[in-house]
Amino acid sequence: MKMLLRGLATLALSAGLAGGAEARPGPVELMDINTRLALELVRHTPTTSPPVASRAFAYLYVAAYEAVAGGSPDLLSLAGQLRDLDAPPLRDPAAAYDEAVVLEAALSTVIADLFANTGPTGQRAMARMAERLGEATAEGLPPEVAGRSRAQGEAVARHVLAWAAGDGGAVVENMGFPLAHDLAKGPGLWVPTSRIVQQQLPLLPDWGGNRTFAMPDGAACPLPPPPAYSEAEGSAFMAEAREVLETRRTLTEEQRAIARFWSDDPMLSPTPPGHWIAIAQQALDARDADLDLRAEVLARLSVAMADAFIGCWHEKYRWNLLRPVTYIRDHLDPAFEPLLITPPFPEYPSGHSTQSGAAAEVLTALLGEGFAFADRAHEEDGLPARHFPSFRAAAEEAALSRLHGGIHFRSAIERGLDQGRCVAAHAIALRMRR
Amino acid sequence: MRRLLLLAAFLATAVRAEEPLVPRFVEETATAGLASSYDGDWEYMVGGGVAALDCSGDGFPDLAFAGGASPASLWRNRSTRGGPLRFLKVESGIEIPAVTGAYPLDVDADGRPDLMLLRQGESRLLRGLGDCRFEPAPEGWGFRAPSAWSSAFSATWEAGQDWPTLALGTYIDPAEEFFPWGSCTDNLLVRPEGRHFAAPQPLKPSYCALSLLFTDWDRSGTPSLRVSNDREYYKGGQEQLWRLAPAAPPRLATEAEGWAYLRIWGMGIASRDLDLDGFPEYALTSMADNKLQTLVEVPADGRRPRPAFVDVAFPRGAIAQRPYTGGDVRPSTAWHAEFADVNNDARPDLFIAKGNVDAMPDFAAKDPNNLLLLRADGTFRETGLEAGVASMATSRGATLADLNLDGLPDLVVTNRRAPAQVWRNVTAGTGHWLQLRLEQPGPNRDAIGAWIEMRLPDGVHAREVTVGGGHAGGALGWWHMGLGPEAAAEVRILWPHGHAGPWERLPADGFFVLSPDAPARPWQPG
């Protein structure tokens, strides 16, 4: 968060003093403050369920990366590596560009497009920030340089947005809940768990068919089946359900704190992918990372998480398993109440586990094994920091939080982490350095 | 949970009782002479309340509208009993801009209602002068509200106090251009010191309140403050219940006591005892699914209940989560909520004003207001379209006062950037009714905090007399009760912090003024 605060301070300075050149926000600060805005917009835009949020982050940070890479001697474009991404518009090698203006134009253009359906407060914040940062970054620059740089950033953004439009996830109607869907019926199959009319059909059932980013397709990281559905005492399935029930009945304060810390509910938080973006920001701040590393980490991380949601959703609708609350109320305890809100889609595997597993692998690959950190992502929400010895330890706690919260069986958690590791390998394999 | 399971079992087995009489409302906006809209941009996306109060002293409810960026306005009721609705705009002293809400109360017990005007800026307390004239509260009252985006209000008289305790809800910090989320400003508790107000005390933590209600939820005789908060803007917040003991700092109800960790886009509160157990249910408006809360358990041994509520909106058919007509399937946005027995069948019905915040594409743009009739089996039936009140305007506030004193609650709805609408209730063949006004000597003349109890064959119908709740507007005047087929009812008043009055049999279809230690006095319009 240190860099976010620095970005804000710079912004306030430039706003208050109508700044000289020394008040211009730099590219790192622009990345930080736009990240903070994106995290808020994810939280406050009703369509940005976790899969949709992961997609938004991926396109935002691919655009940022391409904008930065165009001016960096060390970074390679992702064109030709990410599925169907063509080369972005090239710069004029004979002309001067300002990196801050290029990046700000790219970020603000992508944000305005991806969150075009946000509410009036988000619209107001986006417009005011784009205007103010646009002015601040151009302050003191020769007009032709500022104009050329802005045009370049916007061109990169439009290129990425045009690419995004064809991935199958660009249009999200009815907040992602289909108006018609053939809901299979049978023992062990998912049934609605919510009383909200909109949620009587599951969220984004076709998301697993979306175009992926780094991995070949949504089926690239398949999972073994969950334990065979059974209502018999002694069965593996019943045993997993009993574990959820007993965990709820004996929940410790620490387990409750863990469940709430990783709850990451849509519209009440930046969602699970937003949480890991915040973790990355904190880690990059701790490393005092330069712009190239920030651009690389955020692009790889967000690509891995977006692929993780596609792969996870592919498996969710392949197995279409019921939620613990359904099984436990029917067979073990009709008064069972999970601590967390049960998400309105099939259970296996756990989405948070898959994407946390993927995120942890990417961050470990880029920032190192044993990267100890304090996660302060939810301090503003009154949830104190949690400390982790490594990214993988954080991912394992995130995954297990779904058991504490009563919304997942153990198999969904463990296989979800497995799937995340598989997905991450594709993002880690991208060539981004010369 | 036990009560929920019992309810579910009851609903599963009960034979659906006779359907309630669907009321008929006729829109008289064009002829009533009303012309008020709630104007302005982002700073006025919430608010827009209307107050019903008898400022002229003729018994007919007059109306005070928040105008947002336009001046507030006061409309004197020129209707005749049972006749068409007529209003005349009068210069009253409330014509100031930036008003977001309006609540009447009689601070100084002079029999002339005063007005709290919530504002984008400094909220103002106005003293009623009679004849629908108002002036700023005298310096000696000591009321000072800091500049804020004021969004909610409630008032009560704490035990032993001559003057009311006020609660002002505030919203986000409008100066936060880039990151308004998490910028909720402090709600304020303004307690009296003798016959003036002490300095406001912040209610920390505050979570962007859009409705407040002092309510005696546990029938202890000491109201608590319910706060419904907008989760869009708070961080770490939830719904709140402040418990107030006289002269002690307020304290929040806790999860250990049973208070549920509930996070909604809280926008309005309405309360009424729907199941005749003597304890109020609470309707909480939000975006998408709305809530109807009832106590998890009412102890049989007379002990006070825990502040543990369960949501029964879905099984009772009060969830009202998306438009029921017009073809827009996107979720609704709900604001003012109010219970009123619109067909006089002795069952309170629920009105909800609906309207998009401001071009939010994921929520319904054509979002009809709801009129949910309470059935005998405890479920609700949507009748907004049949009743004629399914307005698609972008609604905010409302009042269901009986504007022409014919015993049938009428309806006024405010709209954002569009004229307010008014409907006359012309339902034929309704049940009987009573309208009661409470009047006690000394402070708290209108007996805020009292309970009206009416004994009918199916039980005791209890109604709490409150100032607050709804969305940005409230009412003070006649308290309407439907009687169904009964030609008379026994009524008594549980006076605030005092004794229970005697049961008194009152003939139906009349107006009565009730005072402690005195028989009910009939009242006639004109």
Image (cartoon, grey):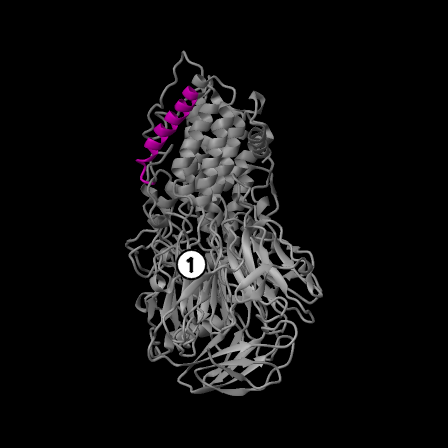
Q: Which residues are magenta?
A: A147-169
> Along the line of sight, which residue is nearer the eye, A238 or A84?
A84
Q: Chain of mark 1?
A: B
Does the rendering let one see residue A143?
Answer: yes
Q: Amino acid at mark 1?
A: Thr
> Along the line of sight, which residue is nearer the eye, B526 or B24?
B526
Q: Magenta segment: does it hold B459?
A: no
Q: Main secondary structure of the magenta part?
A: helix
Q: Tag 1, which secondary structure?
A: strand
**Residue identified by numbered label 1:** B414
Does the rendering let one see residue A190?
Answer: no
Q: Magenta segment: does it hold A149?
A: yes
- The quarter holding residue A354 reads top left
Relative to A66, residue B92 above or below? below
- Image location of residue A147, percent across then percent down: 42, 21
Relative to A251, residue A143 above or below? above
- The quarter holding residue A11 reads top right
Residue at the spot 57% in from the left edge and 63% down from the top edge: B154
- Image location of residue A301, percent across then percent down: 46, 34
